[in-house]
Image (cartoon, grey):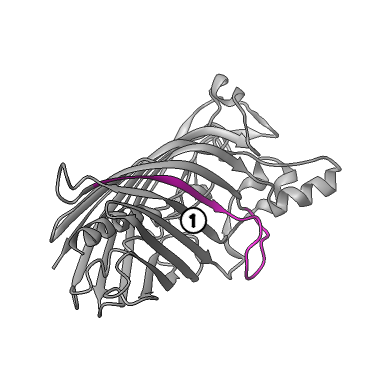
């Protein structure tokens, strides 16, 4: 029984990274919190608190339109480079052996380097100068409740957990920094930063989650996680300034408030014979922004797309302390055709699909304390 519990804890620990989904480059997949399945690893842990701090970092710079990489951007040194680092503070309260509640708040730091935002006129950058913009602050707060479908005391080999939550627009969704070579005399002007480095999306959203595990044998199990954020608000009224780059982008002048999703699954193998509480895990991870939202409109500016990654990880779980590290490595990146792309395709009678910058990999790490 105790070995099953330790394997479950280690399978669950890697699911902390499941919700740690910040903007994957220009496809703005924002941080959503974590630690959903850490509660109830042992059904005797009634009325406990679990504090989890998890971090993520990535650098996006490879441009894709569809699944094809635009390698000329790197050769010409015109690529957009995003650096994103975030820390999530997550507090979970175990109410009993089946119910728990969670509150999560991220702190996010972004830096974006580009040429096209600093002097592009009718498709040509006459200044040929690269500049950077930054954003820093808290992201959107999330509160959720979780419930194990099966009694953990009886269902020791596997279980399924459901979660429902609300995301509040606490992150600044109209953060500003200086755009250069855009003023009346080619000077700088304070404008809203790109959607991919905004700290929030400006919408009140609702989250649905499903987390599951099953121990095939004593030291080997499988896991799965699914997360979906429903954002009913269509747009947040924040100007993108994309219409100043070229008139054909007039329908992308305002930022959209898109849904987002994440799904992952894989296996975990206990290394208790080497180090008690240690395990390794590997699986596949999918995260993205849909073209069309489930509720509300899907117009205005968004960069829809998705990333498939292979996700190896290592986990350790002690009685009061646990940690995990995962490194998702992308093998498919797809910038899909947005609603505004489709509108422009009809207007010009030419297929239009924008591009987006993606990362090669991300680094996720976290620690948890029970008290």
Q: What residue do we see at 40% from left, 57% from top?
A: 19
Mark 1, residue position: 262
Q: Is residue 284 above or below residue 258?
A: above
Q: Is residue 331 above or below residue 3?
A: above
Number of numbered callouts drawn: 1
Which of the pair 346/125 is nearer the observer?
346
In the image: residue 59, left or right of residue 303: left
Image spot of residue 260 (x, y percent): 53, 58
Element marked by disc 1: strand
Which of the pair 158/240 is nearer the observer?
158
In the image: residue 71, left or right of residue 179: right
Q: Most extreme residue toward the right, as rendered?
A: 349
Residue 95 magenta = no
Residue 285 magenta = yes
Q: Which quadrant of the view contains residue 247?
A: top right
Residue range of the region highlighted in magenta in the rendering = 279-301
The N terminus sits in image quarter: bottom left
Q: What residue do we see at 52% from left, 47% from top?
A: 194
Image spot of residue 149 (x, y percent): 40, 76
- Is residue 370 visible in the rendered image? The answer is yes
Which of the pair 165/187 is nearer the observer?
165
> Within 10 Å of the Cα at label 1, are there few (<14), some (14-19), or many (20+) other Cα atoms?
many
Q: Most extreme residue toward the front, as rendered?
A: 217
In the image: residue 237, left or right of residue 139: right
Q: What residue do we see at 41% from left, 61% from top?
A: 171
- Is residue 26 visible in the rendered image? The answer is no
Q: What residue do we see at 66% from left, 60% from top?
A: 292
């Amino acid at each position: 029984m105790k070995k099953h519990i330790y394997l479950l804890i280690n399978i669950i620990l890697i699911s902390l990274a499941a919700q740690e989904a910040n903007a994957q480059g220009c496809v703005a997949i924002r941080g959503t919190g974590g630690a959903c399945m850490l509660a109830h690893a042992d059904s005797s842990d009634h009325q406990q608190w679990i504090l989890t701090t998890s971090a993520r970092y990535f650098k996006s710079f490879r441009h894709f339109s569809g699944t094809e990489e635009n390698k000329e951007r790197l050769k010409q040194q015109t690529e957009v480079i995003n650096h994103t680092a975030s820390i999530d503070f997550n507090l979970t309260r175990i109410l009993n052996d089946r119910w728990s509640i969670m509150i999560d708040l991220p702190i996010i730091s972004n830096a974006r380097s580009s040429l096209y935002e600093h002097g592009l006129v009718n498709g040509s950058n006459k200044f040929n100068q690269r500049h950077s913009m930054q954003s820093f602050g808290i992201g959107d707060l999330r509160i959720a409740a979780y419930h194990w479908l099966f009694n953990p005391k009886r269902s020791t080999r596997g279980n399924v957990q459901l979660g429902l939550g609300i995301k509040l627009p606490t992150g600044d969704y109209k953060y500003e920094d200086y755009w250069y070579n855009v003023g009346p005399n080619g000077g700088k002007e304070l404008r809203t930063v790109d959607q991919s480095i905004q700290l929030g999306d400006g919408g009140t959203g609702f989250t649905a989650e499903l987390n599951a595990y099953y121990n095939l044998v004593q030291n080997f199990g499988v896991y799965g996680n699914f997360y979906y954020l429903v954002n009913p608000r269509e747009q947040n009224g924040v100007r993108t300034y994309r219409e100043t780059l070229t008139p054909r982008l007039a329908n992308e002048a305002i930022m959209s408030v898109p849904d987002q999703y994440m799904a992952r699954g894989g296996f975990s193998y206990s290394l208790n014979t080497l180090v008690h509480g240690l395990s390794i895990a590997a699986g596949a991870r999918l995260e993205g922004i849909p073209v069309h939202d489930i509720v509300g409109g899907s117009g205005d500016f968004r960069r829809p797309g998705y990333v498939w990654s292979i996700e190896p990880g290592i986990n350790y779980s002690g009685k009061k302390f646990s940690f995990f590290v995962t490194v998702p490595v992308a093998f498919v990146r797809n910038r899909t055709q947005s609603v505004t792309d489709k509108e422009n395709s009809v207007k010009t009678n030419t297929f239009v699909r924008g591009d987006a910058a993606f990362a090669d990999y991300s680094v996720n790490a976290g620690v948890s304390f029970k008290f």
